[in-house]
Image (cartoon, rainbow, N blue to C red):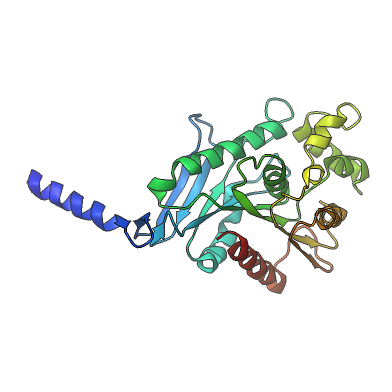
C-alpha cells in the first residue's frame, strides 16, 4: 500500500509541476486559486491576498498583476474586485493575479506608511514564491481603484526601487494629498477621511503630505501609466488626474488618459467594458 501511495503522489507531482526545457522555466499545468493567503507572519486578517494562477504557467512567460482595492483608506476589501476579476482574468489569459488586502487606516497606529509597508510586504512575498507558483516576477503591473490607486501610484512612483513595476493602472486615484485636503469641493467630508490616513494636516506637517503624493515623484523613470476618471467625480476630483496627466507629459512618461463624461466615482455598462479592454491591452503591451 505504501508503494502505491508513493507512486500516486509522484505521478500527481510530476503532472502538476514539471521542468520545461523549451523555455528554461518551471511550469505548472493546472489552474490554481488560493484565497486568504497570509503575506506576513502576522495573524492580521487584513494582511492577506487572493492568488489566481493560470493553467500552463511558467516562470519564463507568466507575468504578474497586483490589484489594490479602494475604500477611503479606511474601508473596503479585496472582495470588492471579485466581479471585475471574473471578467478580467479570462481577458488577461496567461497572467498571474494577486488581489491584496492591507491594514486599514485608523488615524493612529495604522497610517499611510503602514499601508505602503503592507504593499511592500505583499510584493516581497510574491517574489519569494516565484518558483513555487511558476510565475515571472521580473516585470509587474499594478492596478488600483480610488485609495487603492493612490497606493498603487505611490508604490510605483516612489518605492519602485527595483524597477520591477513596469505599468500602472490608475482608476480615479488621488495623486496630490495636499490639494485633496485643501481644495476638495466637500471639505467637511473629505478632510476627516484624509486626516485619518495621514495622521495630520498639511498645515501641521506639510512634508507628510508632500511625501504621500505620487505626483511629486514623477520622473523620466516613472513606469507607464493609464488613467481612468469620471468627469463628474465628487469623491476624487478629476483635477487630481488632470494634474497627474500633465506631470507625466512634462516628464515624457508614456501614459494614456481616459475620461467618461458625466460619470462619477466609478461606472458600469459600456464605459466599464471600455475600461476593461483598455486596461488589459495596456497591461499586455507593457508587462511582457
Q: Quadrant of the C terminus?
A: bottom right
Q: Is residue 71 visible?
A: no
Q: In terms of image quadrants, where is residue 17? A: bottom left
Residue 279, percent from left and from top = 65, 64
Residue 211, percent from left and from top = 79, 35
Residue sitting nearer the eye, 7 or 86: 7
For the image, the number of numbered tags is 0
Which residue is depicted at the point 49% across and 30% down? 43
Residue 158, percent from left and from top = 71, 41
Q: Is residue 259 left or right of residue 155?
A: right
Which residue is depicted at the point 44% across and 43% down? 129
Residue 205, percent from left and from top = 86, 27
Q: Is residue 196 left or right of residue 40?
A: right
As displayed, is residue 263 above or below residue 179?
below
Residue sitting nearer the eye, 94 or 218: 218
Q: Is residue 181 visible?
A: yes
Residue sitting nearer the eye, 214 or 286: 286
Which residue is depicted at the point 71% across and 31% down? 111
Q: In terms of image quadrants, where is residue 226? A: bottom right
Which residue is depicted at the point 57% across and 45% down? 100
Amino acid at each position: 500500500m505504501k508503494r502505491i501511495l508513493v507512486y500516486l503522489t509522484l505521478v500527481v507531482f510530476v503532472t502538476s509541476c514539471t521542468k520545461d526545457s523549451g523555455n528554461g522555466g518551471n511550469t505548472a499545468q493546472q489552474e490554481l486559486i488560493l484565497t486568504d493567503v497570509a503575506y506576513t507572519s502576522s495573524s492580521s486578517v487584513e494582511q492577506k491576498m487572493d492568488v489566481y494562477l493560470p493553467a500552463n504557467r511558467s516562470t519564463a512567460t507568466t507575468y504578474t498583476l497586483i490589484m489594490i482595492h479602494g475604500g477611503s483608506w479606511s474601508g473596503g476589501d479585496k472582495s470588492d474586485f471579485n466581479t471585475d476579476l471574473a471578467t478580467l482574468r479570462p481577458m488577461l489569459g496567461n497572467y498571474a493575479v494577486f488581489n491584496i488586502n492591507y491594514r486599514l487606516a485608523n488615524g493612529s497606529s495604522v497610517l499611510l506608511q503602514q499601508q505602503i509597508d503592507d504593499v511592500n510586504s505583499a510584493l516581497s512575498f510574491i517574489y519569494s514564491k516565484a518558483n513555487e507558483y511558476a510565475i515571472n516576477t521580473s516585470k509587474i503591473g499594478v492596478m488600483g481603484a480610488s485609495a487603492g490607486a493612490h497606493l498603487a501610484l505611490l508604490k510605483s512612483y516612489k518605492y519602485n526601487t527595483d524597477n520591477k513595476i513596469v505599468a500602472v493602472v490608475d482608476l480615479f486615484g488621488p495623486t496630490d494629498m495636499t490639494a485633496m485636503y485643501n481644495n476638495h469641493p466637500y471639505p467637511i467630508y473629505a478632510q476627516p477621511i484624509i486626516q485619518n490616513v495621514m495622521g495630520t494636516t498639511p498645515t501641521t506637517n506639510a512634508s507628510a503630505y508632500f511625501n504621500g503624493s505620487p505626483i511629486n515623484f514623477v520622473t523620466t523613470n516613472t513606469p507607464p501609466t493609464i488613467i481612468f476618471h469620471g468627469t463628474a467625480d465628487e469623491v476624487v476630483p478629476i483635477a487630481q488626474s488632470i494634474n497627474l496627466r500633465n506631470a507625466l507629459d512634462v516628464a515624457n512618461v508614456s501614459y494614456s488618459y481616459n475620461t467618461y463624461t458625466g460619470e462619477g466615482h466609478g461606472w458600469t455598462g459600456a464605459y466599464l467594458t471600455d475600461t476593461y479592454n483598455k486596461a488589459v491591452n495596456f497591461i499586455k503591451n507593457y508587462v511582457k
